[in-house]
Image: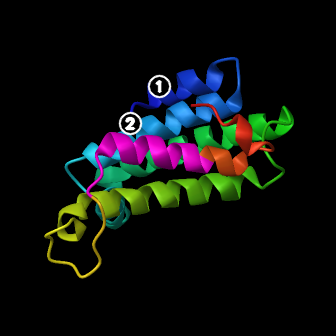
Amino acid sequence: MSLDFAEQVVAEAGSPAVRLLRLLRLDMLELCSAPVDICEVEVLAEQQARRVRRVLGDTAALHGHIGALISDGIARGEFIECDPEFAALNICAAEEGVQRRYRNSAAHAPGGTSPFRHQDYSREHVATELATIVVRGLLRDPRRCPG
């Protein structure tokens, strides 16, 4: 994901929920479109820290941006009280899990090889729906989830 976009979203005025939704949707869309599994890249980065250290720096920056938006939402009374660091950590983990599920979705689609089957969803659907679910879970009033 473009960290420039993330920095721009964090710096914008307006609803933290809307900004977080935009950031998460783009990040999940890009994760589902990535030619490699980000979890595997992170393992390699940790093993070869000198060569691939930037990957972990980008992950840390994204985590920080998500945490900043959550902190802003709490301060404005838009989000529930929670630990922004913990919430950001687990939102990033959920995104990585979604990427893994999306990358392996052919095996789980109708007619696939896995006994666990589900509908085949587009990456746009995955990104939009999961970003909405995550943001709705942080809102004091989930009925006000931005669309």
Q: Are marks 2 and 1 in contact (CB under 8 Å)?
A: yes
Q: Which mark is residue 5?
A: 1
Give how far across and how far down residue 4 sits, in percent.
Answer: 46, 25
**Residue 97 pos. (x, y %):** 41, 63
Residue named by callout 2: 1
Q: Residue at x 18, y 69 (%)?
A: 107
Amino acid type assigned to the residue bearing label 2 in the image: Met
The colour scheme is: rainbow
Residue in the foreground of this view, choosing between 142 and 8: 142
> Is label 1 in a helix, a strand or a loop?
helix
**Residue 80 within the magenta-colored segment of the rendering:** no
| Residue at 81% in and 44% down | 140
Residue 94: x percent and y percent?
A: 50, 59
Residue lying farthest top?
Answer: 13
Q: Taking 96 as reference, is 19 above or below it?
A: above
As drawn, 30 above or below 85: above
**In the figure, is residue 79 to the left or right of 49?**
right
- Would residue 133 appear left or right of 79 to someone viewing this image? left
Q: Residues within 10 Å of mark 1 (few under 14, many from 20)?
A: few
What is the three-letter code of the residue carrying label 1? Phe
Q: Is residue 48 visible?
A: no
Q: Give residue 66's quadrant in the image.
A: top right
At a point 56% along the width and 31% down the height, the residue shown is: 147
Q: Residue at x 24, y 62 (%)?
A: 105
- The circle drawn on residue 18 is none
* Range shown magenta: 120-134
